[in-house]
Amino acid sequence: MSSPRRWCEMLLDRRSEREVLDGLLAGVRQGESRVLVVRGEPGVGKSALLEYVVEQASGCRVARAAGVQSEMELAFAGLQQVFAPILDRLERLPPPRREALGTALGLTSGVAPDRFLVGLAVLGLLSEAADERPLVCLVDDVQWLDRTSVQALEFVARRLGADSVALVFAVRQSDEQKMLAGFPELVVEGLQFQFY
């Protein structure tokens, strides 16, 4: 039986996909913001490409989340995953935004937060974190993310400015409703085996 490494070597190279991801990281390291939606069928290798980003993201802070089908009804569960590593910067946000995000993430009690304020708070938190070093946020299995988190991340993705922030989303191609429409895409096709 072949080792896992040997099977990997038998697969055709993902050179073009890696070049796109390398370009994204280069842009973020130069102070640009980037958004990329990695789209493909289940099992095609989207998660492996996100792992490649993690391996290549030297000098960057990486925040990660993955949608979980059983948490789809839990509002802001996805945001909590993404922002857990950078919540130490929450106090730097203006009070209304800080309170909205704190309530959304269950850090404080209160009425359901205004989603616009939550989006602005997320944008501010990303900007704060990127001041220190480039920030790369990876969200896998977006199709299983709760809708409020997806809306907040879409809001932020459309408003990233000159911050060194990359948002990379992996989502199934076969979704009935196309999530994250209008953003740059990397469509991942299945690989073929080379037989020797």
Image (cartoon, rainbow, N blue to C red):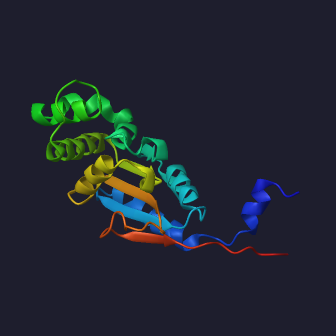
Task: Please identify the quarter of the rendering in which residue 43 is found.
Answer: bottom right
Q: Position of residue 91 (x, y in %)?
A: 20, 28
Instruction: List x then y, in percent, for residue 40.
Output: 51, 68
The spot of residue 134 in percent (x, y) is 35, 48
* Residue 92 vs residue 182, the one in the foreground: 182
| Number of marks in the rendered image | 0
- Position of residue 126 relative to residue 176, above or below, is above
Residue located 20% across and 47% down the image = 119
Q: Quadrant of residue 88?
A: top left
Residue 29 seen in render: no
Residue in front for this viewpoint, 73 or 183: 73
Q: Nearer the viewer, residue 56 or 101?
A: 101
In this view, the residue in front, 175 or 153, is 175
In the figure, 78 relative to 2: above or below?
A: above
Q: Is residue 12 left or right of residue 39?
A: right
* Quadrant including the C terminus: bottom right
Q: Quadrant of residue 112?
A: top left
Percent position of residue 47, x then y? 55, 56
Among all residues in the image, which is located at the extreme right?
Answer: 1
Asked if residue 111 lies left or right of residue 181, the reply is left
Which residue is at 28% across, 57% downward?
A: 154
Placement of 130 over or under 186, stated as above or below = above
Q: Residue at x 35, y 55 (%)?
A: 166
Q: Quadrant of the N terminus?
A: bottom right
Judge whether residue 142 can be spotted in this image: yes
